[in-house]
Image: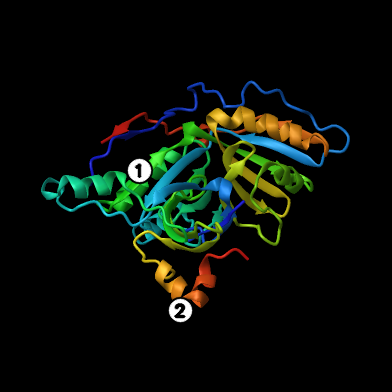
Amino acid sequence: MFYIYCPYCAEYREEEEFHPKGQAHIARPLDPMATSDDAWGDYLFFRDNPRGVHHELWVHAVGCRKFFNVTRDTRTYAILETYRIGEQPSVTADSVSTGSAASTATLTGVQA
Amino acid sequence: MTRVAYFDPHPAPTVPRQSPLHHMAEIAPTGDVAVTLREHAFRDHLNLRGEPGVLASAVESVTGLALPLEPQQVVFGDGTSLQWLSPDEWLLIVPGGEGFRLQRELRKALGDAHFSIVDVSGGQTLLSLEGEEAISVLMKSTVYDVDPRHFPVGKGVTSVFAKANAIIRRVDDTRWELVVRRSFADYCLRWLLDAGEEFGIAFQRAEHEVDAREAAPAGEAEMTT
């Protein structure tokens, strides 16, 4: 079981209270009519499936019912960070591979 | 003022209504009763939504309760309570019959601000769980950590309860409240009675709840637009 930190409730909650909602940070094209079919198809249907650090959208379905972002390692299932909608991740694939954000990675998301 | 149609869902105390648990028989306290379960039906539940900066002063002036701004915080007044549900959502529970008046006053105080007030009284009901073993019954029922070190008085959370969900809040050392959905009330109550059986549990129905307007009936039925 995950023990997930909800950035809105400001505490760890059981995984049972949450639902995953797929990849995070997918921006809808600002002008759909001027968007090519390829770009629209990418936006609508295609998702990353990385091995390693992945940013996901989760919802605290039974708690505060807010959506938030989770940075998760798909190899270990370890949650590296959770952050609010509209914020940018401090832990990314780049920062993990270079090790520069290794210290910040343990700040908010990693289970004790 | 924003044009919103709202009405008193229960315009007079004389209009009959049924609690969600009207069909459940009372269980009288016999022998060692470590948990007493009560239904507090017919309270008025208002769901308030808006930015805290918008709601705070109006809510405090109308209800007398300070809007809880910290996550999981709940404040209790005289028969009233106001609970943080999410960063822009609160649950106000007041004695039956006061909801419509409060809603009208809140709308007046908030004017053109961006907010929403929804009367959810018909959709949920309030249960209280009292006794030294109440915490044990909760431990059997929810995944949330109700240990006193983690769940002090004045905290309230929405979490998984049995196989449904419920708002769980702590009123004092041995008294807890549950807000459950109307359609799950029967299930939750049966679950609680089953969970509490080993400690000795009593159940009191809601008949003793008195409508606030029965004392001073001012009840004009009206629809405000």
Q: Does any portion of residue B131 appear in the rendered image?
A: yes
Q: Secondary structure at mark 2?
A: loop
B35 or B78: nearer the viewer: B35
Q: Residue at x 31, y 54 (%)?
A: A26
Determine crowd level at label 2: few under 14, some 14-19, many 20+ residues with C-alpha closer than 10 A: few
Q: Does any portion of residue B206 appear in the rendered image?
A: no
Q: Which mark is residue B104?
A: 1
In the rendered structure, the answer to whether residue B102 lies left or right of residue A63 reads left
The C terminus of chain B - image quarter:
top left
Q: Which residue is the extreme one toward the left? A: A34
Q: Residue at x 11, y 49 (%)?
A: A34
Q: Mark 1 is on which residue type? A: Arg
Residue A11 x/y as whole percent: 56, 61
Give me the chain letter of mark 1.
Answer: B
In the rendered structure, the answer to whether residue B120 lies left or right of residue A32 reads right
Residue B128 x/y as whole percent: 66, 41
Q: Secondary structure at mark 1?
A: helix
Q: Are marks 2 and 1 on the same chain?
A: no
Labels 2, 1: front one: 2
Q: Mark 2 is on which residue type? A: Ser
A100 or B170: nearer the viewer: A100
Residue B217 x/y as whole percent: 46, 32
- Tags 2 and 1 in contact by the CB under 8 Å rule? no
Residue B55 x/y as whole percent: 37, 56
Q: Which residue is the extreme one toward the right? A: B31
Q: Can you identify the residue that label 2 sits on?
A: A100
